[in-house]
Image (spheres, rainbow, N blue to C red):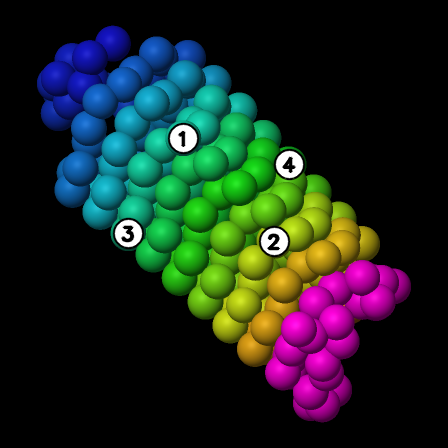
Amino acid sequence: MTTEELLERYAAGERDFIGANLSGKLIGLDLQGINLSGAYLLVYCERSNLSNANFQSAGIADCGFMEANLSGANLSEAILSESNFEGAILIGADLRKSQMIRTSLGGASLVDADLRSANLESADLASASLVDADLRNANLESANLARANLTGANLVGADLRNTKLRDANLTYANLAGVDLSVAILCNTLMPDGTFRDDHCV
């Protein structure tokens, strides 16, 4: 499917493009509520409105979503590895079991996002807002969370091996049972209000 065909059908009121194979640019467009579940996408959607869109189980590796609005979007079990979501709005998004290896999420808003069992290995989350995000059992191995705001986040069962938490804010975060001995803590604000510097180089 071409982007022109998709836009024409969307403008006519169609929303379901399940399993579509799509490549091209969809920059700065209003595509809220679009259903691309199971689709294979090689697209660039910078600054587009994709709120409440459905990308469940879609293949979206190596795509561009910089500053896009994905509030309330369903990205569960999607393959998002090496895609760029810098500055994107993912408030309340469903990212359960998504594959986000080496994905760029710098400065993104993931407030109230559901990231349970998501694979964020080596992902860049520098300066991201993860306030009240659910990161239970997420894989954050070698992820960059420098300056990230994790206030109230639930990290129970998360893998924090070599996770970089320099200048991160963990106020009121739930770290019950989490092994912090393998995390990199540098001027990191802990849930109890203290600062820690472990493995800081």
Q: What element carries label 1?
A: loop
Q: Residue at x 42, y 57 (%)?
A: 106
Which label was assigned to residue 97?
4
Tell me the mark number nearer the camera, choosing from 4 and 2.
Answer: 2
Which label was assigned to residue 33?
none
Q: What stretch is highlighted in magenta?
A: 176-201
Q: Distance between the residues labelled 4 and 2?
A: 16 Å
Nearer the N terminus, badge 2 or badge 3? 3
Q: How far apart are marks 3 and 1 (CA)?
A: 16 Å
Q: Mark 2 points at which residue?
A: 143
Residues tagged 1 and 2 counted as in contact (Cβ below 8 A): no
Q: Is residue 52 magenta?
A: no
Nearer the N terminus, badge 3 or badge 4? 3
Q: Residue at the bottom extreme?
A: 194
Query: In the image, what residue type sits under mark 2?
Result: Ala
Residue 98 percent coordinates (x, y): 58, 36
Which label was assigned to residue 67?
3
Residue 198 percent coordinates (x, y): 76, 76
